[in-house]
Amino acid sequence: MATAHSKTAARLMISPAVLLLLGWMLVPLGMTIYFSLLRYNLLMPGMESFTGLDNYRYFLTDPAFYAAFKNTLLLVGGVLLITTVGGVLLALLLDQDFWGQGIVRILTIAPFFVMPTVSALVWKNMFMNPVNGLFAYLFQALGLEPYDWLGSAPLFSIIWMVSWTWLPFATLILLTALQSLDREQIEAAEMDGAGALARFFYITVPHLSRAATVVVLIETIFLLSVFAEILVTTNGGPGYASTNITYLVYAQSLLQFDVGGGAAGGIVAVVLANIVAIFLMRMIGKNLDA
């Protein structure tokens, strides 16, 4: 009986937090679904009307959606590739014993704590500026013409900025997993004549697979909503060359004042993000059960 009373008391104590969390999520979601069913433009107050699924049809058939969807996939895939491969290499480097190891590790993870807006502004003005940026100076020192990164390769530039931010996170997770690797297993393989590459691909990589899967899951969820780097550097341009789904929803809602179309785009983005999350969660479950 005491156990039943304890469980009831525990449920009552956590119920306010649960209700607050549900309200925090369900109320905005419900309002977004409601607005997505309306023809609602801020430039025409009082002219709202129910349109059903028209906003979804317009959003999904808009050529900008296909460009944004492709850019979203390229952005997520490019950042995952750079951060996963780079994270493994940096983890291997930081796992070695050398003087100042602690300071180097702290400096390595520092970019992850820089705000995305600040990071994007630094890359835009200090590194990628075609007139007085660091890359332009290096190109001129080599006798080459400076390259307009944000104008000629906007999506690649944003991928590089976002990768710089997320590389420390991947490195930290992979380094933690690498430090749990049984050193006796490595030494035994070395005594059996296995070379460095063989030990890496047959021992280290399988050991890091679970940590890499976690990195992919967490990064993917956040990378689907990349926005600040695009806003302060390219504004989605030139054209739709660097527009992802998140920025397209922003442009639809706050630049074109189409609340209904933007809300429909937001629901589409949420559905796509949940599909990806469910797929990745199942992949992680299979990986953990293996």
Image (tube, grey):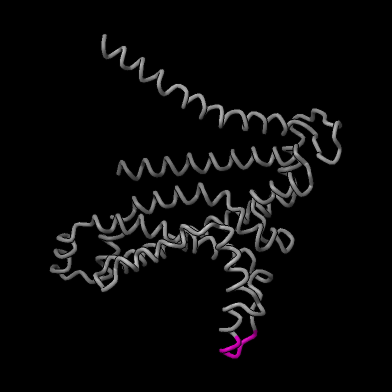
Q: Quadrant of residue 89?
A: bottom left
Q: Which residues are magenta?
A: 140-145
Q: Residue furthest top?
A: 1
Report the residue at 56% width, 89% height from top.
142
Does residue 149 lie above or below 22 as drawn?
A: below
Q: Is residue 74 above or below residue 198?
A: above
Q: Residue at x 70, y 38 (%)?
A: 263
In the image, residue 262 sits, relative to residue 106, either above or below, namely above
Percent x, y for residue 145? 65, 85
Q: Is residue 160 magenta?
A: no
Residue 50 on image: x %, y %: 79, 28
- Please indicate whether residue 148 sits to the left or right of residue 75 in the image: right
Quarter containing the N terminus: top left
Q: Which of the two residues, 95 or 277, is positioned nearer the viewer here?
A: 95
Please state the horizontal and vertical placement of residue 219, each as a whole percent of the image: 47, 51
Instruction: Count all numbered tags in the image, as a single digit.
Output: 0
Q: Is residue 105 left or right of residue 16?
A: left
On the image, the x and y values in percent for residue 201 come to 30, 63
Q: Name the residue: 43% across, 41% down.
A: 281
Residue at image location 81% in from the left, 39% down from the top: 42
Q: Is residue 19 above or below residue 258?
A: above
- The chief SS type of the magenta part is loop
Relative side of 100 to 257, left or right? left
- Which quadrant: the C terminus? top left
Splitting the image into 4 quarters, where does residue 181 fall?
bottom left
Q: Quadrant of residue 131?
A: bottom right
Left or right of residue 283: residue 115: right
